[in-house]
Image: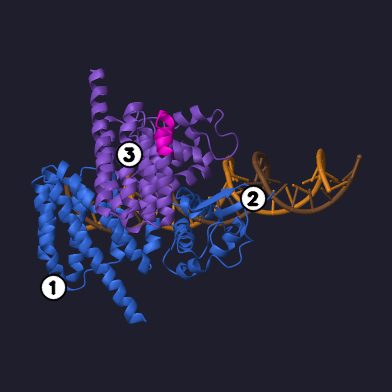
Chain colours: A purple, B blue, C orange, D brown
Amino acid sequence: MKVWSAEPHSGRVGAVIEAEAGRAYPGGARHGRVVHSLGRQIVTGELAPGDPLPVEERLVAELGVGRSAVREGVKVLAGKGLLESRTSAGTRIRPRESWSLLDPDVLGWRFEPGPRPEDVRLLADLRVALEPGAARVAAERADAAGIRGIDEALAALYATADDPDAFIEADLAFHRAVFAASGNDLLLHAYEMISIALRSVRHVHTRVVSHNKETLPGHERVALAIRRHHHRKAEEAMREVVEVARADAERTAMDAKDAHD
Amino acid sequence: MKVWSAEPHSGRVGAVIEAEAGRAYPGGARHGRVVHSLGRQIVTGELAPGDPLPVEERLVAELGVGRSAVREGVKVLAGKGLLESRTSAGTRIRPRESWSLLDPDVLGWRFEPGPRPEDVRLLADLRVALEPGAARVAAERADAAGIRGIDEALAALYATADDPDAFIEADLAFHRAVFAASGNDLLLHAYEMISIALRSVRHVHTRVVSHNKETLPGHERVALAIRRHHHRKAEEAMREVVEVARADAERTAMDAKDAHD
DNA sequence: GATAAAACTTCATCAGATGAAGGTCTGGTC
DNA sequence: GACCAGACCTTCATCTGATGAAGTTTTATC
């Protein structure tokens, strides 16, 4: 009996690779090309879960690389939960639940093209869910180095309030410093992944200089509370910061939608 | 100039594989063996960041597989940020900051052996940081299906209060249901990774039946608040649940330490 | 002692062969 | 006609050997 479903692959898989192949990958890193091309197509939905990948031989032809490169690339994607290959049954795209959504590459493929409106809400919610709690733990656990990191990031925030692009980076760095101060490497990594996505939404957030300045007092309160180990206050201050960001993001998204209609 | 440091690899890398090789992997999955053996050794610290891996040829000999399998395995680990290989310079272990700590495999290698005391604190903090916020977002966003999922998980919790092992699974399922109700797939994935680690700590938590029963009202409050979309109450109720768990964990860890001294 | 060229290492990729694991198809049986 | 055994075929898994590319190290020269 045939367990896996879906008809044989129809479209071509190699278009992107060929387009990129011109110069980006002179000699080596062929397998990296395979990983990124297939990975992106899977994550963006061009190739849907359950779909079979073309057979190795055809991938070799379409991607213009050798079997080794194809196999290594497929193995990497399988390691990220995107693919599963079985002898005699071919390779196919695993269901979305199996993907390592928090893998940096997977996140990148998802958000790099520019976030869709629903992603903006998703990210804003994620920050609301994560950051106040992280600020609380940071207030509980921060040592001198952690507090210093936050203070430095805060100073940078003030220093860059007039430069939108620099401010975005400083803002990301401040929030990162809070996570770092939690002394929890898993938590810090969780933020670093969010920031991959956040950076791609930066056009949406944080454009107006006057608006940036308005957020400074909130950040200051966060830093102060952590410095004093007031976990309750740290959490509340951070919540206010991210709630404001969420409201802004939703308003911006709505504006964009109105403008588009 | 030689940029990478550290002396050539000294010990043998293949011991584990050979030990496992006897029967576990009859025909296929050789490259998976490589991934797990090397991955575990890296994550547990047997191989330290900066260390060079033996050259391919030697890995082939030590691991008892062909070059293809070695290369595919190395590529998978490189995809998880654990390794980096460069032509002519060999393959070496990347610094810990580059690892995908939230990758299921990496988490597994880290926590499966059984958590060390510091990991217990780490996980407890992580829950305190993450779960109240997730409960809040769940209360804001939960739809009928999400609420139903939570209710069912709650019922299972009550039903298994007398069976320690089943209760652990029911507890994990309840918390998962809360994350699922948030409608945020990234958040849900974050929890699923925590749960990989949590499951390995279950010996520490949740052993006493009477104790399990004491946690039921707290869970009930969480479910109720989410059902009614009281985000404030949901967050507070969840905070209480995870704070209690954290206190228990720390007490248990301390007891274990005392018993050990 | 500095510099440039040659030699060497080690990974990257290709190519071909063999094998294993499943799935499919064909006959034959009842 | 339904069912089953076995041959057959497809497709991935792995091994092996050869070639190439990119650094590293050594050596030769001034």
Quadrant hosting residue A255: top left
Provide residue A82's location: percent of width, then percent of height: 36, 45
Residue that badge 2 annotates = B3
Q: Is residue A28 above or below residue B155?
A: above
Specify few, some or many for label 1: CA neighbours under 10 Å numbering under 14, 14-19, or 20 or more: few
Disc 1 to disc 2, how far (Cα)? Answer: 59 Å
Q: Residue at x 33, y 41 (%)?
A: A219
Q: Is residue D16 above or below residue B41?
A: above
Residue that badge 1 annotates = B210
Q: Is residue A166 above or below residue B73?
A: above
Disc 1 to disc 3, how far (Cα)? Answer: 49 Å
Q: Is residue B107 above or below residue A1?
A: below
Specify few, some or many for label 2: CA neighbours under 10 Å numbering under 14, 14-19, or 20 or more: few
Tag shown at residue A258: none
Marks 1 and 2 share the same chain? yes
The quadrant of the picture occupied by the C terminus of chain A is top left
Q: Is residue B75 left or right of residue A26?
A: left
- Label 1 is placed on what type of residue? Ser
Q: Is residue A231 left or right of residue B68?
A: left
Q: Disc 2: which chain? A: B
